[in-house]
Image (cartoon, helix red, strand yellow):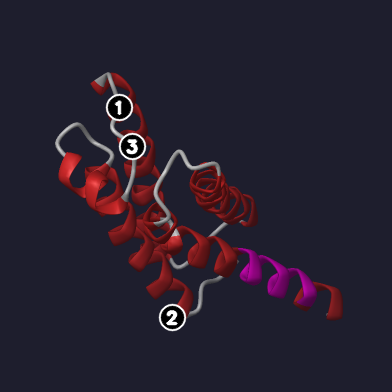
Amino acid sequence: MQLSNAMRAAMFSTVLMNAVGSYALSPMGASLRDLGGLPKTEHPFFLVTLSLFVLIFGAAYCWVGWSGRVDRQFLCVAAVGKLCFFGSITFYALLGHLPIKAVLSGGGDLFFGSLFLFWLYRDHAAKDIS
């Protein structure tokens, strides 16, 4: 799937968001986690694992933005991952395990996950028409 300039800009924006998120989820990012209402963790291993996961996806978004092409499968995984992250934050906030401000820290994931789903739907609909 070819990316429009707007889609490429969104991918590069997601790179920046993931870079900040990766740092916030790293052992050094305690102040950003506090600011975003995210929980403290007991062991740095879990922080490093999650931070690297977010960073690797950020690198993949960078590659997609730079190349100007994306596979539908990658875009689907990216959308589901971002929406699941937002859903998890919302779920735990509604249970009272996270402050409501944590939901705001996941707002970018809701936005980009929804945008990726919209692009998938639009691309699929365009293929049905042709």
Residue 50 in sight in this render:
yes
The count of marks equals 3
Q: Is residue 74 above or below residue 52?
A: below
> Where is residue 13 drawn, in percent x and y?
34, 67
* Residue bearing the label numbered 2: 5
Mark 1–mark 3 CB contact (< 8 Å): yes
Identify the secondary structure beneath mark 2: helix
Q: Which residues are magenta?
A: 117-125
Specify the amino acid type for callout 2.
Asn
Identify the secondary structure beneath mark 3: loop
Categorize mark 1 by other alpha carbons within 10 Å: few (<14), some (14-19), many (20+).
few
Q: Which mark is residue 97?
A: none
**From mark 3 to mark 2, how far is it between C-alphas?**
36 Å
| Residue at 26% across, 52% down | 19
> Where is residue 61 drawn, in percent x and y?
40, 56
Specify the amino acid type for callout 1.
Thr
* Residue bearing the label numbered 1: 41
Identify the secondary structure beneath mark 1: loop
Specify the amino acid type for callout 3.
Pro
> Where is residue 127 drawn, in percent x and y?
79, 73
Quadrant of image for the N terminus: bottom right
